[in-house]
Image (spheres, coloured by chain):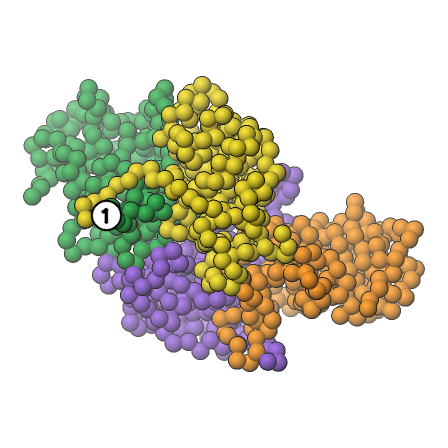
Chain colours: A green, B yellow, C purple, D orange
């Protein structure tokens, strides 16, 4: 069975470490915040200029001056810091964020990522995504493994305009967790009940399948 | 206006000198921390053919979006231009030239412009459509592209508190692009919620020193919220 | 050290891992806002062949000057190295390689290094000995030289107050180079006069966000004054 | 009579305008602060990171955390702002300072300035001088017109290593106030009792002498 969005978030959360500064993109990445393991502390960075993002506000706490990078009203946790967008991207570009999680349309075996533009469709802009992928050493892409018609999104070469070149080394799809090494995807884990065959079939890029590919487990 | 007293008492005076064809740098992220009333004054004046530099372009009927109604903007540098149907139509119709710029690069272009740095290298956008036509250069085995600093004829900024001298403090995430915008205008106009006497703000806690500020006005703000997201209390 | 608690409780622990041959970026201007005790710990450890990046090099017997006594520094990037007889002798004897760097360029090199900008153009130093051998480029009819960003193995920083998470506030002109230094260390160590609980500092008023800080220690400071200049009261 | 240091400062102060942000170098430039005309407000920038420098402190006010760019203890005036050195030089490099006054060893007819290094002598460093001359549109150099042995310091071409190239357009010496235009010094004013002849004699660079060269007056 393919992973649900929640399971994907849950699996990504296992990559967190205590004391990590993390930037979570919109969509599934945002859900990762709900699965931070107990006893572990993670600080969320919001690229508009907030380190230490808290929960959504209660109706009483709503403050127009307090939003996240998705433009949603938020709160900050005790010990947070607020700064300009230039400072925020200095952190990002300078590699100070420990982990970035973001969605993608396509990823290829050379670590290229396409996530911001589908030619012919309306282009809304890349926001901070290009800065995030260029700045973080440590990025996890979350995406469905293939489109609904079965077309792979893990490619030999991205077909859509890139967000970043050679910057991705970890991908979590609804079918598998893979790493990218030396121009190839390496299958590390598969979703419960998903066969290696199915993953092979839905991966267009070069794929190395180790002898033993453990199944993910979820409580 | 004598000495360092930057206060003006009407929005008309605040935007005096703005003309068609000028470049306007605007602070704000989404609808948060935007210079609402300075934008309204630009609309009122009806100046056209503006180049706008701003992370976003407001929404239909609010923020920079109001400048679209009378087609006052002909060119925009922004990182994200969704949330705005009128904008999309004008973009698709070719009425607006949109230069999409990564958010961090946009912030840094303004910071550089204000700081007298004509250009800098960044990895952001290398190997993407944003890097096309730009100089590529390798440092320590990694590839970077050259991006230029940027200043505008006017910078319009929303602060929280300021003193007469134009020393400004921002509030929470309404800071965003405002501090860089403030440094990057030939004429920088700041509107704030409260103006206090010089000496009332702690010198250690000034976000924008008054040297960057040419005009200062106290206003009232709607502060519209784009995505009100709440949890159960 | 769990989670984001950056506190350490000895200077030995604070400078753990520093080795001969490393590059150390130090905050401070003259003797103002210098990480006195972190410097003393470097002296105590006796590591040699250090490259020091700092606006100045202290005075005889205080500040970075103490590292000269046992010839621990072999190279320094600074904008001004007067006020130090021992330094002058080691420089004239060729024991120290001094790379004089304009003050603003030095500040910007550290800011760029910390911000992931490998290089930037500046007019400062064009046409002078500082520009020799550097790429010259024209923007808008004016000439600029290329300067590279810079980071160190360690950055040593003096703050005023900080919370456990390493969010730091500086006091008065003791801020100087400290905020940039804090961003430009592979390991950034901050010593402060007071450590408070997370939540006690206003998030809007943090000068150095904790993300830049690896270790934090509370110390006591002599704060020697280099030029006590007073007026009659 | 050649101007005294105080008269030089007094003459420079006439170039101030109400509302000017000014950076004053060490030496004679520092004295300019004593001659700010009454009713005029000028804000002093100190490049270590202070806008709105005040008087020297009283003995009770001395604070080791509060110094100027000359490392002297200072105070700040109400409405001052304190910032990092990167921000300070952003102001300077970005051309936000209205007037910079600094000393020099030599200036030449092309606006080059040498002020930081005498080869063979000990080199202490340029501090912020190179940034200041490259950043300000508006610089006044203060210096003696010639050395004690009569050698001119206003040259065809600087002989000492430069601090900045083509950046000076106003010079106040103990003998004259001159402007630099199109590769030549232009004599604008002379010190009381100093003859045009003496100035000509002590100016090695190309010098234009208008028909009428007014004498400076001092109260």
Residue C61, x across and y down, in percent: 50, 78
Q: How many marks?
A: 1
Tell me: A187 left or right of D84: left
Residue B227, x across and y down, in percent: 30, 38
Tell me: A46 left or right of A171: right
Residue at image position (91%, 62%) is D195
For mark 1, name the chain: A
Question: Is residue A153 among what the camera can see?
Answer: yes
Q: Which image quarter: residue A185?
A: top left
Residue that numbered label 1 is attached to: A58
Viewer-closest of B198 and B95? B198
Viewer-closest of C3 and C150? C3
Tell me: B35 left or right of A41: right
Residue B226, x across and y down, in percent: 33, 37
Indicate the quadrant containing the N terminus of chain D: top left, top right, bottom left or bottom right.
bottom right
Residue C103, x across and y down, in percent: 56, 59
Viewer-closest of B141 and B26? B26
Question: Is residue C49 among what the camera can see?
Answer: no
Tell me: D203 left or right of D100: right
Residue D8 drawn above or below residue A206: below
Residue A87 drawn above or below residue D35: above
Graded by Cα atoms within 10 Å as few (under 14), some (14 to 19) or many (20 or more), the crowding at tag 1 reads some
The kind of secondary structure element at disc 1 is loop
Residue at image position (29%, 52%) is A76
Residue at image position (59%, 80%) is C233
Indicate the quadrant containing the C terminus of chain D: top left, top right, bottom left or bottom right.
bottom right
Residue B232 drawn above or below residue B50: below
Q: Which image quarter: residue D29?
A: bottom right
Residue at image position (24%, 43%) is B230
């Amino acid at each position: 069975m393919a992973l649900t969005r929640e399971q994907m978030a849950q699996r990504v959360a296992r990559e967190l470490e205590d004391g990590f500064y993390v930037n979570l993109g919109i969509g599934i990445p945002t859900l990762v915040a709900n699965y931070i393991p107990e006893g572990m502390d993670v600080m969320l960075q919001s690229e508009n200029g907030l380190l230490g993002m808290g929960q959504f506000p209660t109706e009483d706490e709503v403050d127009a001056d307090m939003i996240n990078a998705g433009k949603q009203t938020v709160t900050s946790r005790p010990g947070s810091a607020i700064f300009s967008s230039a400072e925020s991207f200095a952190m990002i570009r300078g590699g100070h964020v420990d982990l970035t999680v973001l969605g993608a349309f396509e990823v290829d075996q050379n670590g290229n990522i396409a996530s911001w533009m589908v030619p012919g469709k309306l282009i809304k802009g890349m926001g901070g995504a290009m800065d995030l992928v260029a700045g973080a050493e440590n990025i996890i892409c979350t995406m469905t493994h293939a489109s609904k018609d079965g077309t792979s999104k893990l490619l030999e070469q991205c077909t859509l305009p890139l967000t970043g070149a050679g910057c991705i080394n970890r991908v979590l799809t609804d079918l598998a967790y893979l790493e990218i090494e030396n121009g190839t995807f390496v299958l590390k884990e598969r979703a419960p009940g998903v066969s290696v065959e199915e993953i092979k079939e839905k991966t267009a890029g070069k794929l190395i399948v180790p002898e033993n590919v453990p199944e993910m487990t979820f409580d | 206006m004598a000495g360092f007293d930057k206060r003006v008492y009407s929005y008309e005076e605040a935007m005096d000198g703005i003309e068609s064809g000028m470049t306007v740098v605007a602070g704000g992220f989404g609808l948060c921390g935007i210079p609402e009333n300075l934008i309204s004054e630009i609309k009122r004046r009806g100046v056209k053919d503006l180049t706008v530099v701003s992370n976003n372009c407001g929404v239909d009927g609010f923020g920079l979006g109001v400048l679209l109604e009378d087609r006052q903007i002909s060119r925009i540098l922004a990182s994200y231009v969704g949330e705005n149907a009128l904008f999309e139509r004008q973009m698709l119709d070719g009425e607006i030239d949109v230069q999409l710029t990564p958010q961090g690069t946009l912030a840094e272009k303004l910071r550089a412009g204000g700081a007298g740095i004509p250009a800098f290298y960044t990895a952001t956008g290398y190997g993407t459509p944003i890097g096309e036509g730009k100089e590529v250069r390798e440092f320590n085995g990694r590839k970077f592209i050259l991006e230029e600093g940027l200043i505008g004829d006017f910078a319009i900024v929303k602060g929280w508190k300021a003193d007469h001298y134009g020393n400004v403090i921002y509030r929470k995430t309404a800071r965003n692009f405002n501090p860089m915008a403030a440094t990057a205008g030939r004429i920088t106009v700041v509107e704030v919620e409260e103006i206090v006497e010089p000496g009332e703000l702690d010198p250690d806690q000034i976000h924008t020193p008054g040297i960057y500020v040419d005009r200062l006005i106290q206003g009232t703000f709607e502060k519209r919220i784009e995505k009100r997201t709440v949890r159960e209390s």
